[in-house]
Image: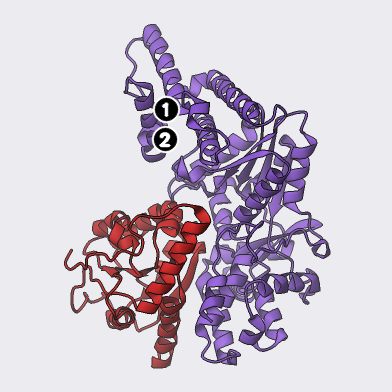
Chain colours: A purple, B red
Amino acid sequence: MEEFYNSLRDVPLEPARDPRYVALSSRPDLQMTDPVAELRRVITWNRRQTRSAQLLSGFRGTGKSTELRRLRSELRAMGMVVVLADIEEYLNTSVPIDVPDFLMFLAGAFGEALIADGALTAGDIGEGFWGRIAAFIQRIEAREATISGKVEPAVHGTKLGEVGGELKLGLKEDTTFRARLQKRMAGHIGALHAEVEKYLTEVVAKVRAKHKPDTQVVFLVDSIEHIRGTFTTANEVQSSIESLFFGQYDKLRLSGLHVVYTVPPWLKVRHAQVGSLYDGCQMLTAIKVTEKADGTPFAPGIQAFEAVMNARGDWNRLLGDHARFVTLVEKSGGHLRDVLRLFIDVVVGADALPVTGPNFKRALSKLKNEMLPIADEHAVWMAHIRRTQRASLELASQLPDLARFLDTHQVLAYRNGDEWYDIHPLIADEVEAQALDVIKRSGS
Amino acid sequence: MSAADFEADWTQLRRHLQYATDFWLGVVCASDIAAVNELRTRALALLPTQTRAAMVRVPATPEELVETLMWLDRDDVREAALVWVEAIYVTEAWRRGWETFFLRGNERRERWRRRLTGGLVVVGPPDLKVWMREAAPDLWSVRILVVELRVEPRESPQAPEAPVPEVAVRESRGRRRRRATRSRRTRTSSGRSSAGAGATPRPRSGG
C-alpha cells in the first residue's frame, strides 16, 4: 500500500526514463491533437528560419511540466540543444510583468540554463548577461543625467559582477527596484531589445561553434502561467500578461532561437486569436471521460486512465471492481491530478482490500467538499458555463475569478475537436442547485 | 462531529504520515482547540523513536505566522518528518496573516517541494481552505490532505491548553531507512547530494 501511495504522487516525470509516464495526448482514440507533436513539428519545419515562438497553455495539474520535458527529450534526440528555464526562479510572480524585465529574464536565464545543462561553460559565455545588461542600464542613466540632470540610479555597483548580481537579485526580490527599472526602461525598450538580441545571437553562435554549425537551439520557458497578482493587484498583473503576449508579441521572437512559452489558459479566453500571432498555440486540457451529450462513459478516456493507473500500481486489488474505477475516473472530470488525488484518498482511507463501500464514497465526498463552498454569484456563472460550454467573460474585471475557477479545477476545459468547458463533475449538481436557488430567490 | 468522523480523519492523517517518503502538504480546518490538540498529540506520538524531528510552530500573533515563512527555510525544519503550523484564531488580523502566509507560500511552493523532506501541515480555522484556495491556487493544487474537523463553533477559540511553540520528536527506524534509501537514489539519479540529508537535528524547545 505504501509503495502504491508513493507511486501516486503528482510530480513532473521524465518521460524518457520514468515507467509511470503514459503519453495520454498522443492516443489517437482520444480524438485530441498531441500538443508536443505539434510544437515539435513547428520547430523541425522551421529549421531554416532559425527562429520561432510558440505558446503552450496548460491547465494546472494536466501534466504540462512533464510534457515540456517530453518535448525536450524528443528534440534532444534529434540533435538539438534544448534548455528549460522556470520564470519563478527569476521574477516575483505576484507583480505586473513588463517587456524590459521579461527580456532581461529571458536572456539571463537562457545563458545560465546552457551552463547548467553543460551545453556551454561559463568560460564559453565569457562576460555574463547580468553584468552586461546592468552596464547597459548605467550607460542609459548616464546619458539621461547629461540631458536632464540628476538621475537616481537603478543599480549602484561599480564592477560588472557586482551590478549584475544586484540586478538579478533586485528583479526577483525587490518590487520597488523592479518598478523603478520598468519605469526607467520604458523609453528604451527598442534599445534594450536590440541589446538582448545581440547577446542571444552571440551565445547561439557559441553553441553552434561548440556543437555543429547548423545546431538548432530551443528555449522552453515554464511557469509564466503562475504569474498572478494578489487580491488587490490581480487585474493589473493579468493586464500586464495580456499586454506582453498580445501587444508585444513581436519582441518575443528571439534571434536564433525556437522558444516555447507556457501561458495561462485564460489568455485564449480573453484573446481567442492570440495563437495567430505566434507560430503555434497548443493547449493541454483534461481528458474527455464522459460523452458531452448524455454523460455516459467515454470508453477511450476510461481506457487511457487505465493505462495511467496500470503504470502506477495494482488498482484492481484496491478497488475490487472495474465499475468503481469508472466512477472514480468519471468523477475526476478526466483531470490527471484529480484522478491521482482520488486514488490517494482511497488508499489512505482503506481499512481492507478491496476498499469498503463507505470508504470509497468518503474519498469522493472529501474532494467534493474541498471545492465547496461557492459564492452565489459564482454558482450562477458556473451554471452558465455548463449550459453554454463556453468560458466567456462579460466584464474584463471578472478575469481573476475565471482564472481561479480554472486554477482550482472548479471549471475544467476539454479539447476533442472543439474546445469546451464544464463544471467539475464532483460539484456540478451542487452548483446547479445553488444557481437555481439564487435565481428563484432573486425572482421572488 | 462524531467520534467516528474524527477517527476517520485521524486515520487519513496517520496514513499520510506512515506512507509518505517525501514532501506532502496537508490542511486542517478546525474551530475547536481540543480536537486540534488531540490530532496534534496523536501525530507527534506516531513518531516515537527519536531520530528525526517533527517541528511544531504555534505563532502567537499574525506577524509571527508570516515570519514562519522564514522559519520554514531553516535546515532543521527541512529535515523534519512533520512540520505542523497551527493558528486557529478567527479575527480579521489573523485572516490577513494567513492570506499573506499563503500568498508568499504560493511563490515558495516549489522551493518547499524541493527542500522539505516530510509533511507540512497547516492548521487553521474553518475558512482556512477557502483562504488558501483563493490566495494560493498553485499551493492549493498540490495539497493531498484536507481535514475538516467539524465541531460546534465557539465565539472565540480557546488558546492552546499547553503552549507548544516548537517541539521535536523523531521518526521510526523503518522510516529513516526508507528515507536514507531515497536519499541514495536521489544522489544516484541526479548526481547531486544535499549536505546534511539524514543528519539528526538538534531537538528544539521554546520559541
User: In terms of depth relative to the viewer, which is nearer, B149 or A225?
Assistant: A225
Q: Which residue corresponds to the image point at 65% horizontal and 78% vertical from the top-left?
A: A328
Q: Which residue corresponds to the image point at 60% horizontal and 53% vertical from the top-left?
A: A65
User: In terms of depth relative to the viewer, which is nearer, A83 or A89?
Assistant: A83
**On screen, residue A406 above or below B128:** above
Q: Are marks 1 and 2 on the same chain?
A: yes
- Label 2 crowd bin: few (<14), some (14–19), many (20+), radius 10 Å: many
Is residue B189 visible to the viewer in this orientation of the structure? yes
Residue B23 placement (x, y as % from top left): 44, 65
Residue A253 placement (x, y as % from top left): 66, 30
Residue projecting furthest to the top: A146
Inter-mark Cα distance, 1 to 2:
9 Å
For disc 1, the marked residue is A181
Residue A194 placement (x, y as % from top left): 58, 20
Q: Is residue A19 left or right of residue A388?
A: left
Disc 2 residue type (three-letter): Leu
Disc 1 residue type (three-letter): Leu
Residue A63 placement (x, y as % from top left): 63, 58
Q: Residue A171 — which label? A: 2
Q: Are marks 1 and 2 in contact (CB under 8 Å)?
A: yes
Q: Quadrant of the C terminus of chain A?
A: bottom right
Tag 1, which chain? A
Q: Is residue A208 left or right of residue B166?
A: right
- Label 1 crowd bin: few (<14), some (14–19), many (20+), radius 10 Å: many
Residue projecting furthest to the left: B206
Is residue A269 visible to the viewer in this orientation of the structure? no
Q: In terms of image quadrants, where is residue B95?
A: bottom left
Q: Residue A330 — which label? A: none
Q: Quadrant of the N terminus of chain A?
A: bottom right
Q: In terms of image quadrants, where is residue B61?
A: bottom left
